Image: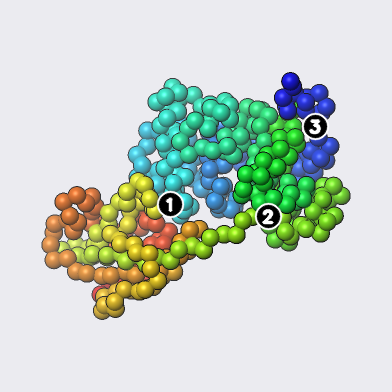
Amino acid sequence: MANHSQIRDMNGPHPFTVKLLSWYENHARDLPWRAHPEPYATWLSEVILQQTRVDTGTAYWHRFLNAFPNVKVLASANSEDVMAQWKGLGYYSRARNLHAAAKAIVHDLNGQLPETAEGWKRLPGIGPYTAAAIASICHQEAVPVIDGNVQRVLSRLFNIDQPVDRKSGRVAIEAAADALVSSQNPGISNQAWMELGALVCKPKNPNCGQCPLHSECLSRAEGTTRDRPVKQPKKRPKDVVVNFDVKRRKIGSGPLEWWIERRPQKGIWGGLESFPLVMTETTTPPPQEDAMWGPVLHILTHMRMNAWFHFSEIQTSHDAGGEETEGLWVAVTDSHRTWPRLIDKVLMDLQNQAVKN
């Protein structure tokens, strides 16, 4: 039995894809990783852009690539340097997985990056989307790429009324994507579908008049564009209170310092530096103290944090943690730490508060 890619070869590209490729040729954004697709640089771009806007991500892509120009350099770097280059991007598990995958490539694959989607999926932190993107763009493997943009475009184009975050909806999207990917030029084809979602078929206020497939779009014809894609109701984020213990000291004429610890690799803010903290699933604020500051609201996809910062003086030159705690004293003015975004965004206020108290 012929597989889908063989059917595409015999029949030529899907008519929708032909129209889309013509549009893409004139409207594709000039992004640096597209000029001369290379697996390492493409991999990096895909990971960065998973949770980051293109304009912000492009600057970080250049920065990261300058610091770690190839997979061997990345694999040999220490985790603190990797996190430092990622600072400000958030979702730090991406950086940890990128580093772990680089080590696996060097140690297990003799430094040779995979050439197939299946090979990429065997690496830490790389799922079907990233694997398909690299394999199709850099090695012309005819596998469809399905990200949020493609999911939205196809659910509207074919008026798919099943939730895309359930199996039935995913199967429908995958079938459509597989039929539309060009076996002759899958990398360009996949990028064109993603570009259509990013530039035209946006989540809100889609520019249907500029879409090359507006006459073929079933949801436009049925008046359901704003209802696609269908998704299950989101769970309400849980409320938590986070109490940060901000210990500070000043020894002689030395600088004002505070005590920081590195978070465990697993869990929230894994591998980042932070003040010691206690997190409680509650909405009740802590008892008022003279030397406390807050609350600071910080919203993640799965939780709403109300953060409080409790200041205390340490009259010793010894470490502030327990016997099993790894940490260090750093100057309050040190700006080269890998803080969670919550701390990073209020750092100036924290510094002023530390000096004041």
Residues at discs 2 and 1 in contact (Cβ within 8 Å): no
Q: Position of residue 349 (x, y in %)?
A: 37, 70
Front position among marks 1 and 3: 3
Nearest to the eye among marks 3 and 2: give it: 2
How packed is label 2: few (under 14 Cα within 10 Å), some, or many (20 or more)?
some
Q: Amino acid at mark 1?
A: Lys
Task: Residue 13: give its label.
Answer: 3
The picture places residue 162, in percent across and down from the top left corner, at 69, 50
| Residue 276 image position (x, y, % from top left) | 28, 59
Q: Earlier in the sequence, mark 3 or mark 2?
A: 3
In this view, the residue in front, 29 or 227, is 227
| Distance from the alpha carbon under mark 2 to that under mark 1 | 34 Å
User: Badge 2 is on which residue?
Assistant: 230
- Going 78% across and 26% down the picture, which residue do you hit? 7
Q: How far is disc 1 from disc 3 in space, using C-alphas?
A: 42 Å
Horizontal side of residue 151 vs 83, given as left or right: right
Q: Position of residue 229 (x, y in %)?
A: 69, 53
Q: Quadrant of residue 226?
A: bottom right
Write down the quadrant of residue 102 in the picture.
Answer: top left
Residue annotated with mark 1: 87
Q: Amino acid at mark 2?
A: Val
Give the amino acid type for the residue marked by disc 3 in the picture.
Pro
Tell me which label, 2 or 1, sits earlier in the chain: 1
- Residue visible at 51% across and 48% down? 60
Helix, strand or loop at mark 1: loop
Give the mark, 1 or 3, whose residue is nearer the N terminus. Answer: 3
Residue that protrudes farthest toward the right in the picture: 215
The image's mark for residue 130 is none
Observer able to see residue 16: yes
CA distance separating discs 3 and 2 = 28 Å
Q: Secondary structure at mark 2?
A: loop
